[in-house]
Amino acid sequence: MGMRPLFHPKVEDITVEGILHALSDPVRVAIYAGIVGQDCSHNCSTFLTVSDKTIPKSTLSQHFRALREAGLIRGERRGVEMHNTSRCPEVEQRFPGLLGAIVNAHTIQSKDEARAKRSGAKRPVRRPAKNT
């Protein structure tokens, strides 16, 4: 009994809504930015730690499945490991500039968050209302 083949949508079936939904999760967008950032295929376990949080393998599999079903990555079983590669070139042809803009925005946000963490800033200080 073999394993079921992985589902990968055809390029013409990839939707903006599907992409935005898949990348609306902070963990998934971090994983995706990591895959896009390095064009080689990625092994799922490389991502057991995303943004300093350890993620259970089962949760990670769900994240990769969401990315795959949205048409963002292609998963390939190699023995017991799953290798994931970006489908950027295909998606870029369908929606020029979309993924680059999302990944760029995520990078900017991540740098801002890292800077805020280093400076110890939690959230903007609220000034007490003046009594008049």
Image: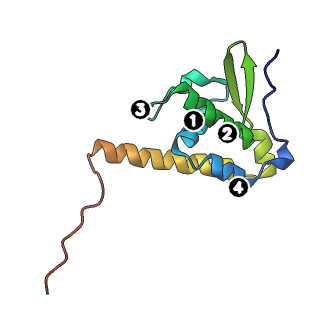
Which residue is drawn at the image coordinates 55% and 51% (left, top)? Answer: 105
Question: Which of pointers 4 and 1 indicates the residue nearer the eye?
Answer: 4
Of the two numbered discs 2 and 1 on the same chain, state the one appearing first in sequence: 1
Q: Amino acid at mark 3?
A: Asp
Give neighbour class at mark 1: few <14, some 14-19, many 20+ (Cα, 10 Å).
Answer: many
Mark 2 or mark 3: whose residue is earlier in sequence? 3
- Residue 77 numbered mark, or none: none
Mark 3: few, some, or many residues within 10 Å (few <14, many ≥20)?
A: few
Where residue 130 appears, as percent x and y from the top left, is: 16, 80
Residue appearing at x 67%, y 40% in the figure: 66
Q: Which disc is residue 17 wearing?
A: 4
Q: Are marks 2 and 1 in contact (CB under 8 Å)?
A: yes
Nearer to the camera, 8 or 73: 8
SS type, badge 2: helix
Which mark is nearer the camera, 2 or 1? 2
Q: Pick the quarter of the image with the C terminus.
A: bottom left
For label 2, the residue is 67
Type of amino acid at the residue the image marks with label 1: Ile
Question: Are the residues flagged by discs 1 and 3 in contact, CB closer than 8 Å?
Answer: no
Instruction: Indicate left or right for 37 with 53 as reference.
Output: right
Residue lying farthest to the top in this orientation? 79
Gap in angstroms between the C-alphas marked 1 and 3 = 12 Å
From this view, report whether residue 24 is shown above or below residue 78. below
Q: Which residue is mark 3?
A: 52
Location of residue 62 in the rendering, given as x and y in whole percent from the top left corner: 62, 34
Do the residues under discs 4 and 1 have CB atoms within 8 angstroms?
A: no
Dot 4, how many residues are within 10 Å of its Cα: few (below 14), some (14-19), or many (20+)? few
Residue at image coords 56%, 21%: 45
